[in-house]
Amino acid sequence: MQETEAEFLKKYDRREYLAPLMTVDAAIFTFHGGKLLVLLTERCEHPEKGKWALPGGFVDEEKDASLEEAIQRKLQEKTGVKAPYIEQLISVGNNQRDARGWSVTVVYTALVALQSCQSFVDNVSDVRWEMYEEALKMDLAFDHIEIMKAARERLKQKALYSMVPAYALPEEFTLPELQHCLEVLIDKPIQKKSFRRRVEQADLMEEVGLRSADKKGRPSMAYRLKEGVKDFTFIRNLDA
């Protein structure tokens, strides 16, 4: 009589087989003061102890029912908030990236508004926002420099055909703030008229009221994102 699947699973012991280390990591970005910032954490244990790294950690089989739950749990531990936008980026695995052994990490990229988590980050000594350009010069742990670059490139592409970068801004923002954020992400200026026509025709934002006067003495309209922005894509890439 052939063995049933239930009988096979009952006696199956996965500990008899070697398995790679399984982690999740996230490149978390925000936009503040006209600069793109990335969140870094200082490693307090070996390997790579004392180095700065992208936030992440091991998948916990008891706490995490999915990879998405694992990365949101790690992000909340490091920022105190749930990321409003998060996307799986790449998977990286080999026998060289981690001194502990064969390692696989599933990498996500996320966007949060600095204001939503700054008080939490300010009160944690091993977490800090770093300007992206400065982070590139750092000796980050593992292969996190390459991961961070890949995440930055994904954001650049997103900026060309979606409104996703707006999640790096405060909940309420002005059109000039959104335009500047996009310009930083695509590394070049955007024509003001075509940009405003593009976002107005997409109807992805709603007015929330006038903001107090700027340096030129003129009030500006503040907006917030509507539902469905994450899944919206423009037919044409952004014209610069």
Image (tube, helix red, strand yellow):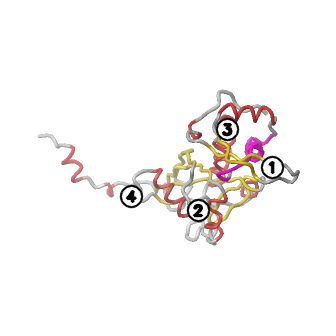
Viewport quadrant of the C terminus: top right
Nearer the observer: mark 4 or 2; the answer is 2
Task: Give the labeled residue for mark 4.
Answer: 61
Residue 10: x and y in percent read 21, 52
Q: Secondary structure at mark 2?
A: helix
Magenta segment, which residues? 170-188
Amino acid type at image mark 3: Gln
Q: Earlier in the sequence, mark 3 or mark 4?
A: 4
Q: Which residue is mark 2?
A: 79
Q: Secondary structure at mark 3?
A: helix
Q: Residue at left 76%, top 31%?
A: 239
Whole-angstrom CA distance, mark 1 to mark 3, is 32 Å
* N-term-proximal mark, 2 vs 1: 2
Q: Is residue 35 magenta?
A: no
Q: Are marks 2 and 1 in contact (CB under 8 Å)?
A: no
Q: Position of residue 176 (x, y in %)?
A: 78, 45
Amino acid at dot 1? Pro
Closer mark to the observer between disc 3 and disc 4: 3
Q: Which residue is mark 3?
A: 157
* Disc 4 and disc 1 in contact, CB within 8 angstroms: no
Say what secondary structure mark 1 lies in: loop
Q: Nearer the viewer, mark 1 or mark 3?
A: 1
**Residue 178 at what x, y percent from top left?**
73, 45
